[in-house]
Amino acid sequence: MTVTAYGAHAGDQPLGPLAITRRAPGAHDVAIDIAFCGVCHSDLHQVRGEWAGTVYPCVPGHEIVGRVSAVGAHVRNYAVGDLVGVGCMVDSCRACPDCEAGLENYCDGMVGTYNSPTPDAPGHTLGGYSERIVVNERYVLRVRHDAAQLAAVAPLLCAGITTWSPLRHWQAGPGKRVGIVGIGGLGHMGIKLARALGAHVVAFTTSASKRQDAEALGAHEVVVSRDADAMAAQARRLDLIVNTVAAPHDLDAYLSLLKRDGTMVLVGAPSSPHPSPQVFNLIMKRRALAGSMIGGIPETQEMLDFCAEHGIVADIEMIRADQINEAYERMLAGQVKYRFVIDSATLRA
Ligand code: NAP
Ligand code: ZN
Ligand code: ZN
């Protein structure tokens, strides 16, 4: 069927309305009427061609929530009317060690929700800035939050899982001091989740104006990273740092804040490299520098259920689809508190 989407035909073009087709649901597919879609900084990187390999037309969006509108004959876990989510992937090989471990996000055959090869027209996947999507049920998540919270649940599908996965993998919890660098879409979720997991949370921001917000989000301490004395006061105090910054910067400033055996996990994915950190900053305290990409399907469901149980959602600003280009500029300027979410009803307007 033909549906309305928002996307771009080239990296230097603004996003605008497009007509796209969605396949009829196959036996294992779930068709979803999209209610809301979060706006991730990755959407901007991808649609503007800041990462290699963007194919056009590009329809971004991988923080999708909505209701099931149809299911295939063999779908067991979902029924028409269910509240569901779709995150950053819609398929994978299902047979490799990563898929068997429930870490489909690391499968070499992972199919991203947008910009990945697919037999469907036009030959690459098209994301959630659209009215409807059809996804194999293995990659669909159940939403257990109240329906009234649905818009604010959308960002959990990327910003939530991308911070949850490293927090869990590196065992953030009681007795651990966890730094969250960059208070944007990912970072504000990182603060909420690390706090709810019981860690002592230190937020790092370049924006002094975000201090009170960071405290309200759950940070025990807030450090304005331009303040050299405040940074020095954190030296060798943190067990784990989750760094969400979307631009190249000096990693040593943060590595030096780790205790012995501490780890800094990079989740921010800037379009050009960070300056190399000093080797001595790693070897002196046996520190580790790591990366992490979104999360697997089982851990995404675990995170959604944890958030439903603890009443955790994102802090959002709702926009109309035709405000997306302006929203990107505001995201670049750090003027979003803390995630834009597209009201999909405005696509039909
Ligand atoms: P965002 O909302 O724009 O937040 C990024 C934050 O980084 C800003 O709010 C800002 O926080 C801080 N920052 C500091 N200096 C900056 C600079 N020069 N330019 C931009 N930001 C700067 O972005 P997001 O959606 O959270 O995404 C963050 C990054 O993670 C992006 O690169 C995105 O592509 C990537 N990402 C990775 C994964 C993964 O799987 N690893 C998943 C999703 C997104 P302060 O004002 O507090 O300093
Ligand atoms: Zn994302
Ligand atoms: Zn696989």
Image: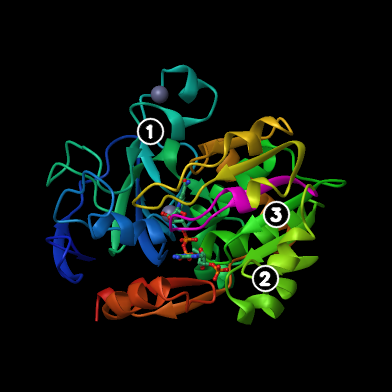
- Taking the spot 53% from the left edge, 53% from the top edge, the residue there is 250
Residue occupying image coordinates x 24% and y 60%: 48
Dot 1 lies on which element?
Answer: loop
Mark 1 Cα within 10 Å, few/some/many (few <14, many 20+)?
few
Q: Name the mark on residue 179.
A: 3
- Please give the label number shown on residue 74: 1
* Front-lying residue, 53 or 118: 53
Amino acid type at image mark 3: Gly
Q: Is residue 106 above or below residue 214?
A: above
Q: Secondary structure at mark 2?
A: loop
Query: Do the residues bearing badges 2 and 1 touch, measured as CB atoms within 8 Å?
Result: no
Kindly identify the residue that appears in the image at 67 percent across and 70 percent down: 227
> Badge 3: how crowded within 10 Å, few (<14), some, or many (20+)?
many
Q: CB of residue at label 2: within 8 Å of ligand 1?
A: no
Displayed-image quarter of ligand 3: top left
Q: Nearer the viewer, residue 63 or 218?
A: 218
Verify CB contact (< 8 Å) between mark 1 and mark 3: no
Where are the magenta residues, as a range? 237-253
Q: Position of residue 116 (x, y in %)?
A: 25, 41
Amino acid at circle 1 = His
Question: Does residue 14 show up magenta in the picture?
Answer: no
Q: CA distance from mark 2 to mark 3?
A: 16 Å
Name the one closer to the observer, 3 or 280. Answer: 280
Residue 227: mark = 2
How far separated are the C-alphas under marks 1 and 3?
A: 45 Å
Res. 76 in view: yes
**Residue 247 on the magenta span:** yes
Disc assigned to residue 8: none
The quarter of the picture where the C terminus appears is bottom left
Q: Is residue 346 left or right of residue 169?
A: left
